[in-house]
Amino acid sequence: MTDAEVGLARAMLAKGMKNDAVHFYFNRANRLISSGRIAQIKNGTYAKDVVAAGPDELEAFLKKWEAEHAAVYPRGPQSPTDLEYIEAMFEKRKTTWHVRGGETDSVECKLNYTISGKIIRAIAGLANNKGGHIIFGVHDGGSTVEGMSDERFETLDPALLNAHLASSLDPVPKVTRVAASIGGKKIGVIYVEKQDHGPVIALKTIGGDLREGGIYFRYVGETRLIKPGELRAIMEAREARAVAEFARRMNRVATGANATIDLDTGEVSGRTGEFVIDKDLLSSIQFLREGDFTQVKGAPALRVIGDVQPISAADREKVRIVRENVTPDSIIENFLLGNSVQDPLAYLHSQAYHQRKWMPIWHYVRQLSMTIDEIVEDLRRLNASMPASRDAVVQRLRGTVTAHKLYSGKPKAMLASFQPGKIVLPKNDADLSAFAYALHGLPDDFQQAVELRPLLAELFKRDTGGKIRPAIYRAVSRVDEILQHQRLAV
């Protein structure tokens, strides 16, 4: 999502709109957005530096959106987890409320909620069909609203439900919990999304309700083991998606957008060149789904970074490509030496995985052919092990945080004595800390900032015990900022 969209979403949430209603405005067929993204915006874990849009901006967006989509989307509640949608599923007959249409192939009724084999089976059945609702507080015989007799549904921990599903079903269905009131009586609703990569299979036996290896399907009025016809339809749909994806990938190979890998020889070939993966690595390559590049889920994966040049057939057996990890010290050293690097984006990514929040960024930004917005969005997509460090980089890219800081005492006196071309390192190691802190206060228009690089490199070497390393890192970041400021001012 762009910053403008995040601001609009934040404004909608501030008005009290439900997550699903907000998600509806930004999710598109050509750009699918997880409903979890809206939850992250709401709790501040995604793009927390972006402020909410103003009332006028939000009103203009909503009017424009409705004008453009009125012919595509009918009026009325769209999300199956919207309260209006759920309330519309009920009707009043004389003095009692009933589920409109009773139990169907997309609606199942239960009186009270409890985590059991029956509930897990019901979720699996709906996921394997077309998705649907499990309604609690309703008599499953006559579909009469009686209300739940306890608060187990209202106090349900979603993480606990997901844990039970993860241990009982594969793949794990996506569910949403909604509490509501019909005719003054409490009901609960679990909405189950259709599983596009089914079938959902039971992993274990739970009493007489769930059988290990069973595939359940929601039929009209009942959930039972799937029949051959429905299973065949699921497999055919799955096969059709696989064929379509294969055709898309082959088309990208044919146009030169993608390359192919031969797992026997290790040769990776594309229209613009080829390279070879060492045979010793072939057996350990892990194939990952798009967006799943995490070290938490299993074995390390092979990742190739940087430009890869074609090689001759005679050299293929003796070439090995090695990429070292990007460390904080290497980020500092390449800046101080003014080096260009093979993959500057990796040097920005690396800062999301270290505790140090002060490292040079603009030296690497200038080596990229990406806008600041593109870099920010790329960083936000990272599964960062140090989110605070990642957010600090984003804030500095946005200009909301700076390494500039003024101190009192000896650093203040040193800063006042600094003159262009006459800055020298203290001879006494005890004064190195004050010198580093003094550099934090350099103004944006300090003209000889580039001449500070060799001084900082020497300061870096003299700090053998690493006692003032944090102060040095921030000093380096300040010089990096000054150089960027001066380039923009030209």
Image (cartoon, rainbow, N blue to C red):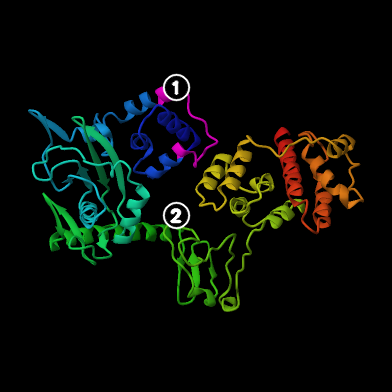
Q: Which residue is depicted at the point 60% across and 69% down?
A: 321
The answer to whether residue 31 of the structure is visible from this angle is no
- Residue closest to the eye, 69 or 140: 140
Residue flagged by tag 2: what amino acid is it? Gly
Q: Which residue is depicted at the point 52% across and 66% down?
A: 302
Residue tagged by mark 2? 291
On the picture, is 177 further left or further right than 426?
Answer: left
Residue 256 in the image, given as x and y percentages of width and height: 46, 59
Residue 280 in the image, given as x and y percentages of width and height: 54, 77
Picture layout, residue 173 above or below residue 41: below
Q: CA distance from mark 2 to mark 1?
A: 35 Å
Residue flagged by tag 1: what amino acid is it? Pro
Residue 488 in the image, given as x and y percentages of width and height: 70, 35
- Residue closest to the eye, 9 or 246: 9
Residue 398 in the image, given as x and y percentages of width and height: 60, 37
- Residue closest to the eye, 434 or 183: 183
Residue 409 falls in which quadrant of the image? top right
Residue tagged by mark 1? 55
> Which label was assigned to residue 392?
none
Badge 2 element: loop
Picture layout, residue 42 above or below residue 194: above
Q: Which residues are magenta?
A: 41-61
Circles 2 and 1 in contact, beta carbons < 8 Å: no
Badge 1 element: helix
The answer to whether residue 128 of the structure is visible from this angle is yes
Q: Quadrant of the C terminus?
A: top right
Which is nearer the N-term, disc 2 or disc 1?
1
Q: Residues within 10 Å of mark 2 (few under 14, many from 20)?
A: few
